[in-house]
Image (cartoon, rainbow, N blue to C red):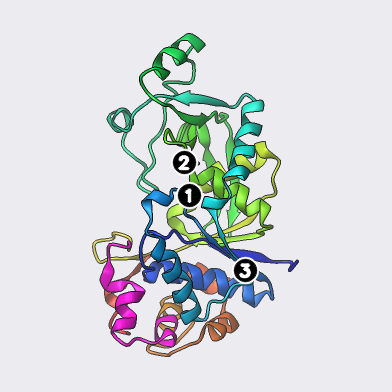
Amino acid sequence: MASCVGRFAPTPSGRMHLGNVFSALMAWASVRSQNGSIILRIEDLDIRAHNPEYSSLLLNDLRWLGLEWDSGPFYQSKRTEHYKEALNSLKQKDLLYPCFCSRADLHAAQAPHVSDNTYMYTGTCRNLSYAEQVELSKHKTPAIRLCVPNKTYSFEDRVYGLTSQNLAESCGDFIVQRADGVFAYQLAVVVDDADMGVTEVVRGSDLLSSTPRQIYLQDVLGLSCSSYAHLPLLVAPDGRRLSKRDHDLDLGALRAQGKTSEEILGFLAYCIGLAEKGEPLSAGQVADRFSWDALCAHRKNVVVEHFLQVL
């Protein structure tokens, strides 16, 4: 196995937009610059929420961009037994409890964190008696929450530096399995990264605040810990990060306009100072120029409207 193993893990909920491509490109370029290998994982935990055709489009777009992978694609929807084993391990450690709170209850209690739109959980259901749990279960299927310690978890991010978070104060006990039986992203991604030997996680800064939760899960499950690098986001002029609702900036629209893969990759490299304005680059050429110093120097979010003139 290569000494550096990275991954790209898209969700098949729509066509990739420029922000998704930027994350894929940086993860790929970092690994290739180290002569490592990259894994492709399709994060389709809730297959009911996705159009199966998008998975095929993802693979096609990545190949068109030249972002070939060494293993995969692996589909989370086919890995539920692995998540069940992890959940059972947490249960044996007496770290889980059923939560009957509705989304409305959470919304009424507290505003979400700006970074990842999650809500601070105050532990409403943590100390329910067994009899209370049984009675509530008659009316509502519970989600499963993981108890968190009053402890600060820290890690050194390759772009944003030392990041620390006290889980009890910042997020509270968090969900590891939803009421409908779907396993939570936090649990699945930790299990998958460990099983697949991932040593380097490169992804958007919108997931920066979730990393301490994942490190805690790695700790209690006895799993290996990756290094982390979180990337600046591509945002609209109003500061809103790009989403798959921005169809004019997705690969389908850009390819239909006749944009080449080299134009798109060169534009993304230009955003962090790795290319000249309007310079087309292949994926391999971006990898040859890749530099964490460049990313650290350009870690502010990129306003896309300003740079679209380049394309």
Residue type at tag 3: Ile
Q: Is residue 109 visible?
A: yes
At horizontal 60% and vertical 40% (from top left) the residue drawn is 217
| Dot 1: element | loop
Q: Position of residue 120 (x, y in %)?
A: 40, 34
Q: Is residue 187 above or below residue 271?
A: above
Precedes in sequence: disc 1 or disc 3: 3
Query: Three-letter amino acid code at disc 1?
Result: Leu
Q: Residue at the spot x=32%, y=33% of the render?
A: 103
**Residue range highlighted in magenta:** 243-265
Rendered residue at 47%/36% (across/down): 181
The residues bearing labels 1 and 3 have C-alpha atoms spaced at a distance of 21 Å
Is 207 in front, or is 9?
9
* Image location (x, y in percent) of residue 133: 46, 15
The residue lying furthest to the bottom in this view is 279
Asked whether, in this view, residue 301 is left or right of residue 286, the answer is: left
- Please tell me how crowded label 3 is: few (under 14), some (14-19), or many (20+) other residues with Cα within 10 Å: many
Instruction: Specify whether 311 is left or right of 224.
Output: left
**Residue indicated by mark 3:** 38
Q: Label 2, on which residue?
A: 182
Whichever of labels 2 and 3 marks the residue nearer the N terminus, that label is 3
Q: Which residue is mark 1?
A: 45
Q: Vertical placement of 217 versus 5: above or below?
A: above
Question: In whole angstroms, how far apart are the C-alphas of marks 2 and 1?
Answer: 7 Å
As drawn, the residue found furthest toward the top would be 131
